[in-house]
Image (cartoon, grey):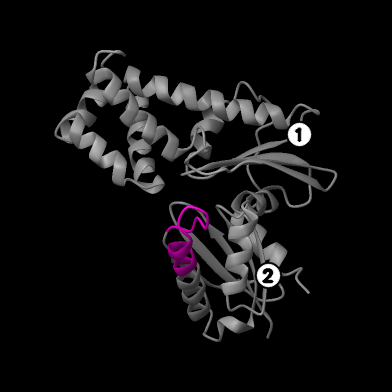
Amino acid sequence: MKLYLGVDGGGSGCRAAVADAAGRVLGRGEGGSANIWSDFASARASILAAAGAALAAAGGGALADLHAVLGLAGANVPEAAARLAAELPFAATRIETDAFVSLKGAIADGDGVVAAIGTGTVYGVQRGGTVRMIGGWGFLLGDQGSGAWIGRRLLEEALLAHDGLVGESPLLLAVVREAGGPAGLLAIGQRARPADFAAYGQRVHVASLDGDPGAEAIVAEAERHVAGAVDALLVEGPVPVCFLGGLGAVFAARLADRYAGLVRAPEGNALDGALRLARALP
């Protein structure tokens, strides 16, 4: 029996599913962070761990027999994608960005915009079968509005508040206090990875709901970045908009009025998109 593997890998984790030719999922697995640009070795290990777990749950077999499509953070860097494809053991391998497989899972072959907002951010639009992707450039130079970006902004604003350059808030004060002072916060920032910053980002969203002014200012700034990207993809005319990822629901709610009548629930998730593409492999 021919088996297909779909993988969805981002900065916070990696998920895999094995399906048969009819699309019936036989097994699922999970792994760690899988951004092939920011940490290639860890990403490769996470992908293989998730794929192996999914195959075992499906009843076992060899990775070399799987026809695989992987949607991965960092795959928009061609060198990283090509290197990974050469090092994977699958019978057939196609590597796409995590946003591309998310788009295919969310809207299949229809027209629409996808905003994938989690540890990172990336966006795509499909019109008449043609796909255009923007963003997804990684935490160092991109990912504006993402969980990691929000978390880094929290630490930045906390230091500015400590210096009296922006207004204080309970969250900003707490972050500095918990770190043992500004030097401790600097040490945290030096060793933190995107997923670590994203954990701070979660605190920002919770605090913003409680009315913390520092948190709300950061979330509002993130919202402007997200809206700017979505607006850019809607410039040719309105199409449905799907918000995906761990923070997708947050921004769907915040931007509901701006995109009134356009926001739609996705048809499926990134794994559905990866498996759909995998089943089309020769």
| The residue stretch that appears in magenta | 33-46
In front of the other: 235 or 84:
84
Can you tell which quarter of the image residue 157 is in? top left
- Label 2: which residue? 23
Q: Is residue 141 visible in this depiction of the protein? A: yes
Q: Residue at x 71, y 47 (%)?
A: 107
Image position of 53 with respect to 101: above or below: below
- Label 1: which residue? 239
In the displayed structure image, the side of residue 278 where residue 40 appears, left or right: left
Tell me the crowding category of disc 2: few under 14, some 14 to 19, or many 20 or more residues within 10 angstroms, Cα based: some
Tell me the crowding category of disc 1: few under 14, some 14 to 19, or many 20 or more residues within 10 angstroms, Cα based: many
Question: Which of the two labelled residues, at mark 1 and mark 2, occupies the earlier sequence position?
Answer: 2
Image position of 119 with respect to 15: above or below: above
Q: Residue at x 81, y 29 (%)?
A: 236
Give the amino acid at mark 1.
Val
Q: Secondary structure at mark 1?
A: loop
Q: Is residue 116 visible in this depiction of the protein? A: no
Horizontal and vertical percent for residue 150?
A: 41, 33
Horizontal and vertical percent for residue 198?
A: 39, 42
Cα separation between marks 1 and 2: 28 Å
Give the amino acid at mark 2.
Gly
Can you tell which quarter of the image residue 272 is in? bottom right
In front of the other: 210 or 140:
140
Horizontal and vertical percent for residue 175?
A: 23, 31
Task: Judge depth for marks 1 and 2 and give the one in front.
Answer: 1
Residue most toward the front? 79
44 drawn magenta: yes
Q: What quarter of the picture does the N terminus occupy? A: bottom right
89 drawn magenta: no
Q: Residue at x 78, y 74 (%)?
A: 282
Image position of 248 with respect to 279: above or below: above
